[in-house]
Image: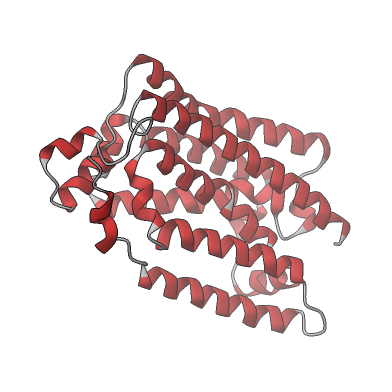
Amino acid sequence: MSYLFLFKDRLTWNIPLLIGVFIILFLYVFLLKKTTPEKTPYTHIGLFFSGLCLFSSIIGSPLSALSHLSFSLHMIQMGILYFIVPPLLLLGIPYDMYRLITRLISFKLIRNGLLWAKTFLYIFAVLLFIYHLPIVIQTLSKHVFFQNAYLIVLFVLTFGMWWPIVSPHPKQRLSGKTLKRYVFISGLVITPACLFFIMTAFLNSVENPFVSQVAAHLCLPSESNSFSLLPPPFNTQYDQFIAGTLMLLLHKLGLMMSVKLKAKFMKSH
């Protein structure tokens, strides 16, 4: 039996988060007018606006509730949040705006360069892997505050992770062999978290704690905890295999998108 119709009263927008997004957009437009009074960098605006729209859609819209119904939908959400949104937002910041921001706020950690970027990358990869261990994800799913705090830390780390590729400052972007080496390392350290799902798909299926959480929240009957909210192949060993594969593909997509857009922007700065 499908219980998706019960979500109709839960599929709402996160109003506080959307207000925060509009505030960020307002500040962005304000700083844009301050720093580029005679020209409007439409490409920058498009990238930044796209990043905010994706962020709002996967975190603040009804889609965020549906992402908890299976590992694969959950991984699509996390892949977009960590591998697509941050580079879009960073590429959407013009250099003149970046210089103004750095005069107002000190970014000493980011200015230390590649060493800090690798540190952010390694910490992110470890935390991402730990988050998806069964005991950790089951524990965090029972404590929403700590779960959200954990995910926020991951999101913040991604900006340091993507900084050497799509930094608003052209001189802080990697190029040549150094860039290729960093991209290779990035793909290497993210892989274990993705392979975990792929391997467990062949060994045994890991129970999705989000489904149990959603079922309890909606006061569904106990049999709904056996993953009846979505039809096969969701919430089966195939779902776990798809989840790991999707995370790898989204990370690869984020790297390819960032490198190509970075190369395009290097010509204009």
The residue at the far front in this view is: 1
Eyeballing the image, is 1 above or below 153? Answer: above
Residue at 25% over, 63% down:
9
Q: Is residue 42 left or right of residue 11?
A: right
All told, the count of numbered labels is 0
Image quadrant for the N terminus? top left
**In front here: 130 or 245?**
245
**In front here: 255 or 181?**
255
Residue 218 shows in the view: yes
The residue at the far top in this view is: 203
The image position of residue 256, as x and y in percent, is 71, 41
The image position of residue 99, as x and y in percent, is 72, 70
Q: Is residue 87 left or right of residue 9?
A: right
Q: Is residue 112 left or right of residue 77?
A: right
The image position of residue 55, as x and y in percent, is 50, 59
**In front here: 224 or 71?**
224
Image quadrant for the C terminus? bottom right
Instruction: Tell me which corner region of the image, top left, top right, bottom left or bottom right, holds residue 170.
Output: bottom right
Instruction: Tell me which corner region of the image, top left, top right, bottom left or bottom right, holds residue 205.
Output: top left
The image position of residue 215, as x and y in percent, is 19, 46
Instruction: Tell me which corner region of the image, top left, top right, bottom left or bottom right, holds residue 32.
Output: bottom right
Residue at 15% over, 47% down:
216
Q: Is residue 164 left or right of residue 197?
A: right
Residue at 37% over, 67% down:
13
Residue at 52% over, 30% down:
245
Eyeballing the image, is 69 above or below 89? Answer: above
